[in-house]
Image (tube, helix red, strand yellow):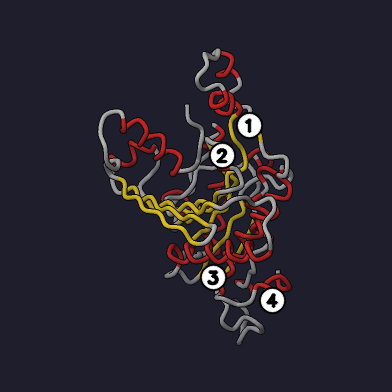
Amino acid sequence: MIRTDLAEELRTHAMASKAKHAKGELDGILYNERKEDFIRISTIEITDARGEESLGKPMGKYVTISFPSAANLTYADFLKLCDAVAVELRAFCWDYSHALVCGIGNRDLSSDALGAIAADHVLVTHHLKQMDGPPIGTGGFGDVSAFTPGSTAKTGLETAAIIHSVVENVRPDVVIAVDALAAREADRLARTIQISDAGIAPGSGVGNVRSALNRETVGVPVVAIGVPTVVDTATLLHDALEGYSPNEEIIASLSGLFVAPKEIDAIAENMGKVIGYAINRTLHGDFPYEEMAMMV
């Protein structure tokens, strides 16, 4: 079983299976990629039911931004990565006026804290936009709200239900949901950012599926942003023992045991800040990062 939230990994696996029978792209899938400096950007569009069946993902657009590592980013590379994410995110959010940013996950667990950290770095302005008269200091800025619904294990409530309740009261045009993801390959950990307009199913990559967050469950379009922070131990062992005759029963027994990089604290902080700043650049315009750091 492939445990991953990444559309690109699912496509790679499906393409490998297809290669045994036929050449060419998968039916119902459009794919392209490009490279900008140290960043590789690929786009997968699932256009119909055939594509959904091939990848096990709902129809929509999935953008994957790949880079060497999030653990030791230089300041220059940090800024380039923020810009790259902002450019791709704008393509999903350009025609929305009021955005609600939702930082999903457990703040107390480093491998699951990405969403909460990202939300902490988002410049919120909705309360100022609602003030009578011209709001002070919000000229040129977008209308942005943000909150962290917490994990179901902490609240006992479905994240989708909480977000839906907030949407009904705040009435944003779009929800931007940020969450930690699971990867199939260890090389993807902290080296990939996925953006999608197909929503998100929190916990799906680790086999703990909750209610999906999408237009149907939330009531408005949902743009999902995530970074893989964990990988299944069973897949690591299976890859390490390729070419041998491993005991598949023992390997299968380890499925569901997930591991994260040893630098996960720094990774979560770095990637949370990258995504938070990229959201700011998307929704508030290209004001300097130095000013952004003072305002959030």
6 vs 288: above or below: above
Does residue 93 appear to the left or right of 104 in the view shown? left
Given the image, on which type of amino acid does mark 4 rest? Glu
Query: Which residue, given by chain and number where applicable, does mark 2 sit on?
Result: 182
Sequence-first tag of 3 and 4:
3
Query: Which residue, given by chain and number where applicable, does mark 4 sit on?
Result: 291
Quote the CA–CA distance across marks 3 and 4.
Answer: 15 Å
- Front of the two marks 3 and 2: 2
Sequence-first tag of 1 and 2:
2
Sequence-first tag of 3 and 1:
1
Quote the CA–CA distance across marks 1 and 2.
Answer: 9 Å
The image shows residue 88 at horizontal and vertical percentages of 47, 62
Foreground: 248 or 175? 248
Query: Which residue, given by chain and number where applicable, does mark 1 sit on?
Result: 258
Task: Check residue 232 in the rendering and tell me which mark sits there, or answer none.
Answer: none
Crowding at dot 2, Cα within 10 Å, few <14 / some 14-19 / many 20+, comes out as: many
